[in-house]
């Protein structure tokens, strides 16, 4: 079992699961099409789910298990995931050897399996009793009245039965020094604009590569463009793009930008106009130095660019696109921005996604302790 990309006649793309003879696994394919076409999930989401379902179905096949009713053995599946590589042809590791998957990756696989089996229950091909093997149901009857609210009815919550504890980690952000080093390593105005747009506007790589020229409103008054927002800004919109770029959020958003981003874009525009093949392309980011010239950049090319810049700048690590976005989010909050402001700028649907950036730096913790010491020291003893 393995994940496999599919392109429909409508040009929609998604990932499915195929067996060793490259025959589509129908039950998995139906669910993955449901995610992509019915729930408007990103192609990358179906890829991650297809990889997870391929692992689950391979585990069932190897053990002679029925995938519909094997939810009661998910503990064994977790152990199998720890030691079994994704590639079916790779040797299996064992006790005493490094694990091939950590808790975070295993939890994401389990989430995909739960969604797959829930969908099967809804279709009537999986027994409803399987849900009790996947989730434990609790209610709020033992909570204090204040915590339950005004509604006197019981509220039920379903919690996954199988979930590993994940170690708490700091947000892996690009530092300001790393951003400056990356900018210094750029050899073109386009590359500088890419670094600036991610580090000072917080764009994801898919959002950046999906920008069209009509999305750029770098003017003081955009009313002439049919836009009510004032000041320089850009619009992030979800579209099906030929380069595979995809805006994660279904909701469009306007992102204000500062003068440095505007300047970087203006400089890039002159460079772009010198490429004859790029003049008729509506995408903002295009290939200028490698064929096919004038065609929109792939999101993966942004990763390749940053890896090259990291090496050229002599950094101790390779900086990835999302680390620039993390750096932007952390800078917004550390500069006194509210969580709802950061949430809107980043395009997060849930505030919990934004709250991960609230981890204070060691410098902020030190400053907090020193403020307490100063505020509780008698005025006569301060020096």
Image (cartoon, helix red, strand yellow):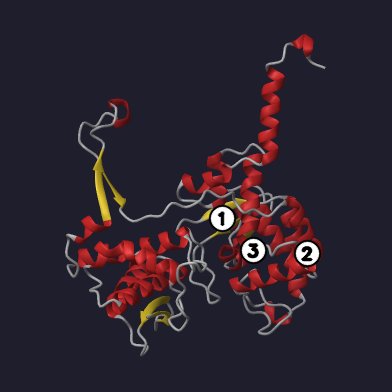
Residue linked to disc 2: 267
Q: Which type of secondary structure does the marked residue at label 2 adopt?
A: helix
What percent of the width, then of the height, locates residue 227?
A: 57, 53
Could you say which quadrant of the image residue 162 lies in?
A: bottom left
What percent of the width, then of the height, locates residue 130?
A: 21, 61
Residue 226 is labelled as 1
Residue linked to disc 3: 320
Residue 26 is labelled as none
**Which quadrant, please, contains the C terminus?**
top right
2 or 3: tag closer to the N-terminus: 2
From this viewpoint, is residue 365 visible?
Answer: yes
Residue at x-position 81% and y-position 62%: 184
Question: Is residue 108 positioned above or below 288 on the image?
Answer: above
Name the residue nearer the viewer: 149 or 118: 118
How far apart marks 2 and 3 lie (CA) works out to 24 Å
Count every numbered label the image shows and give the total.
3
In this rendering, position of residue 277 left or right of residue 254: right
Neighbours of disc 3 within 10 Å: few (<14), some (14-19), many (20+): some
Q: Return the residue found at the far top.
A: 380
**Which quadrant, please, contains the N terminus?**
bottom left
Could you say which quadrant of the image residue 155 lies in?
A: top left
How far apart marks 1 and 3 lie (CA) works out to 35 Å
Residue at x-position 45% and y-position 76%: 92
Name the residue nearer the viewer: 246 or 111: 111
Neighbours of disc 2 within 10 Å: few (<14), some (14-19), many (20+): some
């Amino acid at each position: 079992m393995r994940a496999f990309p599919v392109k429909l006649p409508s040009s929609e793309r998604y990932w499915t699961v195929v067996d060793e003879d490259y025959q589509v696994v129908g039950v998995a394919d139906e669910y993955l099409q449901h995610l992509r076409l019915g729930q408007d999930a990103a192609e990358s989401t179906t890829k991650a789910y297809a990889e997870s379902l391929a692992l689950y179905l391979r585990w069932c096949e190897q053990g002679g298990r029925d995938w519909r009713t094997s939810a009661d053995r998910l503990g064994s599946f977790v152990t199998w995931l720890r030691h079994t590589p994704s590639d079916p042809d790779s040797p299996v590791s064992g006790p005493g050897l490094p694990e091939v998957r950590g808790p975070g990756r295993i939890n994401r696989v389990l989430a995909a399996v739960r969604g797959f089996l829930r969908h099967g229950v809804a279709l009537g091909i999986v027994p409803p009793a399987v849900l009790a093997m996947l989730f434990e149901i609790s209610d709020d009857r033992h909570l204090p009245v204040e915590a339950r609210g005004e509604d006197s009815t019981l509220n039920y919550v379903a919690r996954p039965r199988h979930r590993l504890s994940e170690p708490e980690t700091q947000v892996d952000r690009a530092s300001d020094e790393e951003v400056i080093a990356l900018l210094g390593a750029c050899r073109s105005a386009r590359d500088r604009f890419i670094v600036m747009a991610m580090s000072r506007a917080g764009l994801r790589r898919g959002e950046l590569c999906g920008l069209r020229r009509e999305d750029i409103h770098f003017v003081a008054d955009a009313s002439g463009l049919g836009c009510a927002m004032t000041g320089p800004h850009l619009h992030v919109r979800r579209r099906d793009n030929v380069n595979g770029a995809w805006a994660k959020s279904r909701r469009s958003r306007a992102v204000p930008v500062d003068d440095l981003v505007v300047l970087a874009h203006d400089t890039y525009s002159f460079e772009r106009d010198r490429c004859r093949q790029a003049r008729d392309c509506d995408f903002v980011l295009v290939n200028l130095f490698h064929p096919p010239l004038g065609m929109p950049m792939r999101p993966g090319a942004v990763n390749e660019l940053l890896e090259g810049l990291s090496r050229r700048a002599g950094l101790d690590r390779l900086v990835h696109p999302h680390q620039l976005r993390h750096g932007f989010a952390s800078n917004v909050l550390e500069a006194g921005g509210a969580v709802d402001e950061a949430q809107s700028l980043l395009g997060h649907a849930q505030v919990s996604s934004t709250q991960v950036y609230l981890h204070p730096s060691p410098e902020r913790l030190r400053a907090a302790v020193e403020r307490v010491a100063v505020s509780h020291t008698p005025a006569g003893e301060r020096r």
